[in-house]
Image: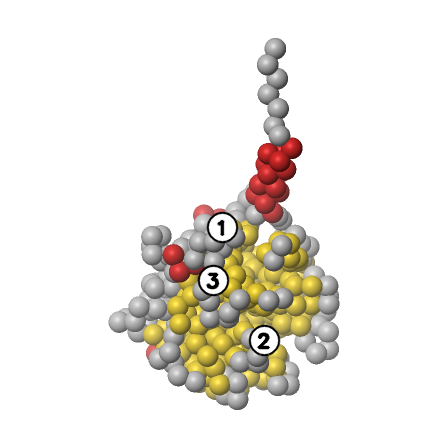
């Protein structure tokens, strides 16, 4: 009788593959309270609480004391944001904010556009408290138009190991860009000097929502692939690559450049979690924390939170 056996090395390889696949479908951690969110960003406050911003009328805010229970905290701009109307056509909805805390104040980068258009702009506001109505508008940061080969939405601030400030952004078209900022103003040193760091030339350009983080000797470029904003039918998924330089080149775990469509899948649709994406990562006392949105079976967007650890230099969501 012939008995088929796998060598120990093959068994270990299969176990590792199965483990990696399972990690791509981890469920979100416990959250409660006001859990509706889209394109979330979270910052830990100096007081030890949490401030979130997300896509909504005049940029919506939430707060939490424990990272679990969230409460609505009103719009950043309760009196409106008329400076954005050339890009929004008068719509109140402002997209994809990014929160950071530096120099004793909060920095809020956010987008103004209309769906499917590259007539877009990223703006900056600051606040000492982060509260609704406390934000000071500092105007335009980056803009794109219908002749641009990029889209000026989905901003994310990263301060590199040398203390230099960089803003990544982008959605579809030619992909994700990064530009150096003057840290005294929070605006580009030269907005003509855009560096490309990720694209999907063979997939309709479907990459957006960059978030660059640093851990150890590497920078990690998190992005979302495929389609957002279609409720439970959304195909969004979270991908990552890494580089030893903030400006790239970024490659995935298999070594494929992100400029050629590379990206290691970190989280994808499963069960009642549909289209997880547009993530941000911040560091807390218990390590790095991933925040993102996903859609429930009824199509309502929800806040997802998971922790992140690193194995062999690569992030693992759990």
Please indicate whether residue 283 sits to the left or right of residue 221 in the image.
Answer: right
Mark 3 vs mark 2: which is more N-terminal? 2
Question: Could you give the CA–CA distance between mark 2 and mark 1, rounded to whole angstroms?
Answer: 26 Å
Give SS at disc 2. loop
Please report the residue visible at 46 percent of the width from the left and 79 percent of the height from the top. 180
Neighbourhood count class around disc 2 (C-alpha, 10 Å): few under 14, some 14–19, many 20 upward? some
Name the quadrant containing residue 194: bottom left
Of all residues, the one furthest to the left in this rendering is: 147
Q: How many marks do you count on the picture? A: 3
Q: Which mark is residue 106?
A: none
Can you identify the residue that label 2 sits on? 161
For residue 117, side relative to residue 105 (left or right): left
Determine whether the residue tagged by mark 1 lies in a helix, strand or loop.
Answer: loop
Q: Which mark is residue 250?
A: 3
Colour basis = secondary structure
* Numbered disc 3: secondary structure: loop
Residue, x 59% and y 56% (percent of image)? 314
Check contact, mark 1 vs mark 3: CB within 8 A: no
In the picture of the structure, the residue carrying the numbered disc 1 is: 254
Residue 260 in sight from this viewpoint: yes
Q: Hey, which quadrant is residue 4 in on the image?
A: top right
Distance (Cα) linking label 3 and label 2 = 17 Å
* Quadrant showing the N terminus: top right
- C-alpha gap between disc 1 and disc 3: 11 Å
Q: Position of residue 269 (x, y in %)?
A: 52, 47
Front in this rendered view, residue 134 or 183: 183
Write the residue at 34% across / 64% down.
174
Front residue of 101 and 263: 263
Q: 77 or 158: which is nearer to us?
A: 158
């Amino acid at each position: 009788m012939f008995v088929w056996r796998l060598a120990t090395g093959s068994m270990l390889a299969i176990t590792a593959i199965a483990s990696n696949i399972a990690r791509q479908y981890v469920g979100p951690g416990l959250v409660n309270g006001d859990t509706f969110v889209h394109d979330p960003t979270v910052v830990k406050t100096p007081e030890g609480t949490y401030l979130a911003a997300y896509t909504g009328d005049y940029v919506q805010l939430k707060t939490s004391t424990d990272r679990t229970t969230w409460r609505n905290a009103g719009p950043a701009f309760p009196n409106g944001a008329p400076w954005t109307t050339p890009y929004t056509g008068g719509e109140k909805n402002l997209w994809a904010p990014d929160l950071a805390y530096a120099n004793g104040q909060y920095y809020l980068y956010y987008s103004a556009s209309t769906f499917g258009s590259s007539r877009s702009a990223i703006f900056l506001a600051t606040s000492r408290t982060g509260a609704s109505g406390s934000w000071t508008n500092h105007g335009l940061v980056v803009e794109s138009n219908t002749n641009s080969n990029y889209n000026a939405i989905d901003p994310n601030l990263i301060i590199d190991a040398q203390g230099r400030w960089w803003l990544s952004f982008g959605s579809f078209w030619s992909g994700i860009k990064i530009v150096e900022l003057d840290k005294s103003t929070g605006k580009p040193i030269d907005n003509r000097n855009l560096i490309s760091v990720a694209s999907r030339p063979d997939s309709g350009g479907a990459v957006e929502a960059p978030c660059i983080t640093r851990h150890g000797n590497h920078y990690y470029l998190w992005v979302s692939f495929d389609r957002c904003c279609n409720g439970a039918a959304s195909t969004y998924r979270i991908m990552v690559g890494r580089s030893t330089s903030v400006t790239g080149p970024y490659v995935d775990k298999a070594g494929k450049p992100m400029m050629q469509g590379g990206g290691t899948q970190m989280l994808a649709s499963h069960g009642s979690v549909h289209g997880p994406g547009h993530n941000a990562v911040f560091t807390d006392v218990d390590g790095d924390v991933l925040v993102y949105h996903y859609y429930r079976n009824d199509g309502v967007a929800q806040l997802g939170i998971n922790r992140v650890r690193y194995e062999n230099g690569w992030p693992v969501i759990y």
